[in-house]
Amino acid sequence: MSTQADHGHELIPRPEQTPDALRAALAVIDPSRLEEMQSTKDDAFAKAVEWQSLSPVRSWVLTWARDIEIARRPDLSDRHAHAKSNLENDDPVLAQEALRELSAVLDEAMKAVRE
């Protein structure tokens, strides 16, 4: 579990990496994405059965843990939103900087949830 000293203000504690815990966290910080979460979960479980592998489920868990990490931390959320808003900037330098920043935010969030 991370601390506020590590990342500044956090809206909620980092959830456990289980479907129920991730869903509960998303319901608090971004309920508009619950339907998307359920749809991607259904797809991941269907692939897991088809492929006879848990890798699609693990990928689903990590993707949602990462997205929730971004949403629960205003520092990452602000950086993420700013970068996404500049991805299609007419200035190619700004668009490239936005892409680098978006990648950095995603990497930082993934690193945090893998700790």
Image: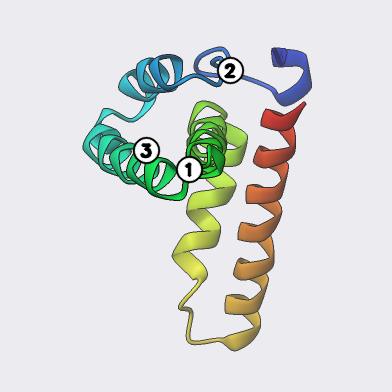
- Which quadrant of the figure has residue 13? top right
Residue 103 placement, left or right of 45:
right
Q: Which residue is mark 2?
A: 14
- Residue density around tag 1, few if under 14, some if 14–19, many if 20 or more, within 10 Å: few
Q: Secondary structure at mark 1?
A: loop
* Residue mark closest to the camera, 2 vs 1: 1
Q: Which residue is located at x 49 percent, y 31 percent?
A: 68
Q: Where is residue 87 shown, x and y percent of the image?
A: 50, 72
Nearest the eye: 74 or 22: 22
- Rendered residue at 37%/25% (across/down): 26
Q: Quadrant of the C terminus?
A: top right
Residue type pointed to by label 2: Arg
Alpha-carbon distance for marks 2 and 1?
30 Å
Instruction: Please give the label number shown on residue 52.
Output: 1
Disc 3/disc 2 C-alpha distance (Å): 23 Å
> Dots 3 and 1: beta carbons under 8 Å?
no
Q: Which residue is mark 3?
A: 45
The front one of 36 and 79 is: 36
Instruction: Decide which of 90, 99 is in the foreground and name it.
Output: 99
Write the residue at 48% across / 87% down. Answer: 90
Q: Secondary structure at mark 3?
A: helix
Element on which disc 2 rests: loop
Report if the CB atoms under discs 2 and 1 are less than 8 Å apart.
no
Up-down relation of residue 96 to residue 65 (above or below): below
